[in-house]
Image: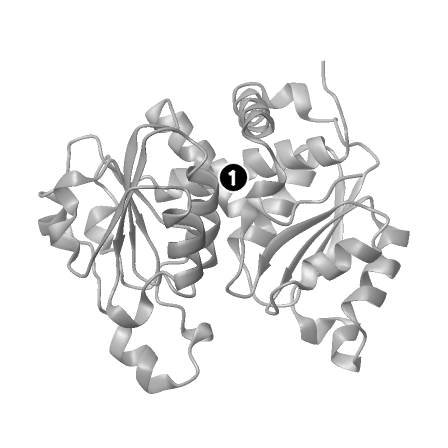
Amino acid sequence: MRHLMSPMDFSVEELDRLLSLAIDIEQNPKKFAHACDGKKLATCFYEPSTRTRLSFEAAMLNLGGSVLGFSSADSSSAAKGESVSDTIRVISCYADICAMRHPKEGAPLVASLKSTIPVINAGDGGHQHPTQTLTDLLTIRSLKGHLGDLTIGLCGDLKFGRTVHSLIHALIRYPNIRFVLISPEELRVPSYIREDVLDKNHIPYREVERLEDAMADLDILYMTRVQKERFFNEEDYVRMKDFYILDKAKMTLAKKDMLVLHPLPRVNEISVEVDDDPRAAYFKQAQYGVYVRMALILTLLEVEVC
């Protein structure tokens, strides 16, 4: 039995197989329509989510399975003080696989240690968001045709952004990856990412504050929102929330084949006028999230479809 806590839980070869399976699912949906008949997915979401929770549910339903779970801590026994360890022991009696989101870093890992079913980390605090990373990798591979030899700009909240941290960990394993880290001083990539991941692995990167200074060099621009829920006070959030706004004027500085990605939800960091630009791939990205989660469910449940 395997769990998914981090993108690093899969080797590059395993990731490639997973992404190839997701592409097969996209191209041949009927082939997989009954792959999980009789199987149940539990979605245990201790904090709000739209895309991640619903895409997991859509993924299992598309595979012919069923879904149960809760969408907030208030609607679970956590409100009564039940521990994550006890919750997963109970959920293991009801479901075949579990996707868990939790505001505390490491909570899904704790659950996996007590679980008798596969547990998927669907986001833990500001730490990791591995299934979003799988979605990002599938989007890049599908639209660019490869995952190496790319200059990737990461823009916005690089300090608390778990999607950014997970994506950096995953991409450094591919050849000729370069990063441009675009953020204000207060939201820079944490030192442990910079030193223990980028520097240690000799990954080329530069840090800039102005988005305009990076646009011309990028193959991928990964925008993120400034996350209000990660700030300790309202004043700091208000000061930071409009620091970056991608608009048509900035898009004129970019390559003709650059892709704009965003894990969503967006607030106002991407102007709606960019949505019609053929380089805006963030809604396609959300669709790819269903395919990759279908592939992950099949992989962890060890379901093979001929």
Mark 1 Cα within 10 Å, few/some/many (few <14, many 20+)?
many
Q: Nearer the viewer, residue 7 or 176?
A: 176
Q: Is residue 128 visible?
A: yes
Q: How many numbered discs, if any? A: 1
Seen in the picture, residue 54 relative to 290 is either above or below; the reply is below
Q: Is residue 241 visible?
A: no
Q: Is residue 12 left or right of residue 223?
A: right
Q: Is residue 231 left or right of residue 152?
A: right
Residue pictured at 79% horizontal, 72% vertical: 83
Q: Position of residue 228 (x, y in %)?
A: 41, 74
Farthest residue to the top: give it: 306
Quadrant in the picture for residue 171: top left
Residue pictured at 32% horizontal, 86% vertical: 235
Q: Nearer the viewer, residue 191 or 151?
A: 191
Residue carrying label 1: 134
Residue pictured at 65% horizontal, 34% vertical: 62
Residue pictured at 27% horizontal, 46% vertical: 205
Disc 1 on helix, strand or loop?
A: helix
Q: Position of residue 270 (x, y in %)?
A: 26, 55
Farthest residue to the right: give it: 93
Seen in the picture, residue 154 relative to 135 is either above or below; the reply is below
- Tell me the kind of residue under disc 1: Leu
Image quarter hosting the N terminus: top right
Q: Is residue 123 left or right of residue 120?
A: left
Image quarter hosting the C terminus: top right
Q: Position of residue 77 (x, y in %)?
A: 79, 73
Q: Position of residue 39 (x, y in %)?
A: 81, 38
Colour scheme used in the picture?
Answer: one colour
Q: Nearer the viewer, residue 29 or 183?
A: 183
